[in-house]
Amino acid sequence: MAEDQDKSQQTEEPTAKRLEQARENGDVVKSPEVTTFILLGGGTLAIAMFGKYTSMGLARTLTMFLQQPDAMSVDGAGLAAMMWLLLPPLALALGPFFLVMMAAGLAGHMLQSLPSFSFDKIAPDFSKVSPIAGFKRMFGAEGWMNLLKGLAKIAVVGLAIWTQLWPERGSLEGMLNQSTVTVMHDMSRLLFKVLMASLAALAVIAGLDYFWQRMRFMARNRMSKQEIKEEYRQNEGDPTIKAKIRQLRHDRARKRMMAAVPSATVVIMNPTHYAVALKYESGKMAAPVCVAKGVDALALRIRAVAEENDVPVVENPPLARALHAAIEIDDPVPPEHFKAVAQVIGYVLRLQGKLPARAG
């Protein structure tokens, strides 16, 4: 009951991390029908490429068994010598064919999933040799599904082969009266027709089976909402803790900003909504620097601290809004605001007697 409840809670699609963990554990999308299709395709290609070469090599090698069987020695030394005589030409004749088939077999696995090695798959599992577990596998849902798939595959492939051979039934009956060369030519033609029909049928079966295996794989790895939350916490950290850290950083930055207000040269205000504190030291700075800024309650706090420390406060709403949007803490004033800021700072310095008053 608990297992059913857990399965019912797994309603979310698996994340990339869950799929990667499944691959590392050896759980991948694998369709045996795809492998069979690629193997048959590789065999067809090998016959097309090396069929004539292989048949001629086999014919040359095995001719002596048909022409001179009485001359063969069957004692121990004779059989050993015969094997040493037969193996090299057989390897040369069959080698290319088997190389293509080996490459097709590897491709059948590699194209479906990346190579992975997991000790979980080779670890002893005594449930696999249990008669009860074997009986459940054979007569359970999985066993019946495999049986239906096997019957459907036999039916589809058999029908495809029948459609190719039935129209040729007349020529098959007349082959006994034809020459050996003609029989070989006709048999090769029929063989390729049968192989191509089988490949077409297996292509459909392989596509459907891969789709089915993909659906089962995704279903096996579905996650509950709680699992997704736990994975997010592992990857990104606890959201509560991260929010706390952000708040602490924000508070510390605000304290440092407010501590810099008393050293500002001027605070430019939009009476109650915006405040930007600028610092400028002639000969030491190329341009005024923003040491504090804020809106609403923070703007009023900046103004209060500035007034407590005799920092001039100048009300200039357009400039205050423009500077608040254009610069961050410790940034210099942008060039497009130089003239307006220079006028304000010049006005403040003249009031403080640090610059001579303008003539007139």
Image (cartoon, grey):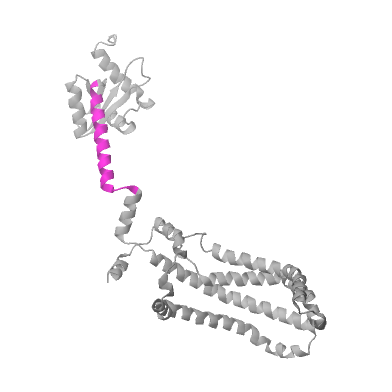
Q: Residue at x 40, y 76 (%)?
A: 133
Seen in the picture, residue 322 relative to 265 is either above or below; the reply is below
Task: Please identify the quarter of the rendering in which residue 204 is found.
Answer: bottom right
Answer whether residue 315 is visible to the viewer in this image. no
Query: In the displayed structure, would residue 276 be above or below residue 249?
Result: above
Q: Quadrant of the N terminus?
A: bottom left
Residue 115 spot, x, y in % from top left? 52, 59
Res 162 → quadrant: bottom right
Q: Main secondary structure of the magenta part?
A: helix
Q: Nearer the viewer, residue 318 or 297?
A: 297
Q: Is residue 102 left or right of residue 68?
A: left
Read off the magenta span: 236-262
Image check: 332 left or right of 51? left
Residue at the front extreme? 76
Q: Is 304 rendered above or below residue 12?
A: above
Going 77% across and 72% down the picture, which residue do you hit?
81
Percent across and percent down for residue 267 are 24, 24
Percent of width and height locating residue 278 = 29, 24
| In front of the other: 324 or 133 | 133
The residue positioned 26% from the left and 30% from the top of the image is 293
Q: Indicate yes or no whether the magenta region holds residue 252.
A: yes
Res 104 seen here: yes
Quadrant for the C terminus in the image: top left
Image quadrant where residue 12 sits = bottom left
Frontmost residue, 300 versus 256: 256
152, above or below 22, in the image:
below
**Residue 40 at x, y = what percent?**
61, 72
Q: Is residue 15 left or right of residue 271?
A: right
